[in-house]
Image (cartoon, grey):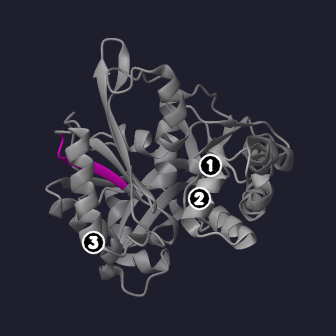
């Protein structure tokens, strides 16, 4: 999708997916076998607050050190990395162009990118494009997806990865990684619409796909951290105490802790409301009244009552995503129950690990 070093040609050289979130790092390798795709390696570790801020690297040395530690404990030998951007760090825009081949399109965008992307200095921007196909309402035009990010943001990630002794090969986008994961694991027809929602620690990604192709994306800066902050403020707790309460409950006995967890969804109203507004906007703009499925991922997907709350608000069934629906755990995670537990937080990194050199 968004290949920071340009089109790298064919080849099947193995790549490892590295999901750099604001609260954790996740690493995954997926390999081909006679029985299909296998998760050959998976490892995750927490990332200190303040290393990633608003989708940008705020502490490069700390990120490099964390990546080195991740690799040390994972035992991963693959040095070629696929990672991704999210939130305000990246701009995704669908634009209509007259029919032309990809070479002509790239030349045109290079010369006139300022017309389509909201940057004053295009020399300070990395961007890529993908032809989606013919405009369904105007056969003389085609729809093109533009993806752009400031070079300084891209370089913040690539330099931290390179300083860890690795090679950043592809820079993807979280929303498109969800799409890749969905295409691999779920069956769909040409007109089937699915909404993929990833609630991370600081950013929520939403990608509506039709027939497996993205038709609408939106990121907003609300996630699990905002829920933690609301709990901390309401109960006068530290952020660490609130994070623990969000997972384990709060109270002096088991009944009180259980009751608290059942009510945690009340603190998630800002996130749920923003998701509801985003889906309503998508429906009104694209005329997609019939959504086949809504798949929820990220740490926020595991908040008690989240699927039921969103299902009621959206008027459709919401389910937790399974990024291992058609990918086996292999030796990396032989325990099926463990594979099920890590599924919701693995959607993005699985999508990254599925990328190949030169694909789009």
**Where residue 305 is drawn, which disc sits there?**
none
- The outermost residue toward the front is 252
Categorize mark 1 by other alpha carbons within 10 Å: few (<14), some (14-19), many (20+). some
Name the mark nearer the viewer: 3 or 2: 2
If you read the primary sequence from the N terminus, does the residue marked by circle 3 or circle 1 appear first? 3
Q: Which residue is mark 3?
A: 60
Q: Measuring from the top left, give residue 192's x and y in whole percent.
A: 68, 34
The answer to whether mark 2 and mark 1 are in CB contact below 8 A is yes
In the rendered image, which quarter is residue 246 located in?
A: bottom right
Residue 277 visible in the shown view: no
In magenta, the rendered stretch is 78-83
Q: Is residue 330 shown above or below 136?
A: above
- The residue that appears at 45% across and 69% down in the rendered structure is 55
Categorize mark 2 by other alpha carbons within 10 Å: few (<14), some (14-19), many (20+). some
Depth check: give the residue in front, 19 or 302: 302
Q: Is residue 79 magenta?
A: yes
Q: Which residue is mark 1?
A: 247
Q: Which residue is mark 2?
A: 243
């Amino acid at each position: 999708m968004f290949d920071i070093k340009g089109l790298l040609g064919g080849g099947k050289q193995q790549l490892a997916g590295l999901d750099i979130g604001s609260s954790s790092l996740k690493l995954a390798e997926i390999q081909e076998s006679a029985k299909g795709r296998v998760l050959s390696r998976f490892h995750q570790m927490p990332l200190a607050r303040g290393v990633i801020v608003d989708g940008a690297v705020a502490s490069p040395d700390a990120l490099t050190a964390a990546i080195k530690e991740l690799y040390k404990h994972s035992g991963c030998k693959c040095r070629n990395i696929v990672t991704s951007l999210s939130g305000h760090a990246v701009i995704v825009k669908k634009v209509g162009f007259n029919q032309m081949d990809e070479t002509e399109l790239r030349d045109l965008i290079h010369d006139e990118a300022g017309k389509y992307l909201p940057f004053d200095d295009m020399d300070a921007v990395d961007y890529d494009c993908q032809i989606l196909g013919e405009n369904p309402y105007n056969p003389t035009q085609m729809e093109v997806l533009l993806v752009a990010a400031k070079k300084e943001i891209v370089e913040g990630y690539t330099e931290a990865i390179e300083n860890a002794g690795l090679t950043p090969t592809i820079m993807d986008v979280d929303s498109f990684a969800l799409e890749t994961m969905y295409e691999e694991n779920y069956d769909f027809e040409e007109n089937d619409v699915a909404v993929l929602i990833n609630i991370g620690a600081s950013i929520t990604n939403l990608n509506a796909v039709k027939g497996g192709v993205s038709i609408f994306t939106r990121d907003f800066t609300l996630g699990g951290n905002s829920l933690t902050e609301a709990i901390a403020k309401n109960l006068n707790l530290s952020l660490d105490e609130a994070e623990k309460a969000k997972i384990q409950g709060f109270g002096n006995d088991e009944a009180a802790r259980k009751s608290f967890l059942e009510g945690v969804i009340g603190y998630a109203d800002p996130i749920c409301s923003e998701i509801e507004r985003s889906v309503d906007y998508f429906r009104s703009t694209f005329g997609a009244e019939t959504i086949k499925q809504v798949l929820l991922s990220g740490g926020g997907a595991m908040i008690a009552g989240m699927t039921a709350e969103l299902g009621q608000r959206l008027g459709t069934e919401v389910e937790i995503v399974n990024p291992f629906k058609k990918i086996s755990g292999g030796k990396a995670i032989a325990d099926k129950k463990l594979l099920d537990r890590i599924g919701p937080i693995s959607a993005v990194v699985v999508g990254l690990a599925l990328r190949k050199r030169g694909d789009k």
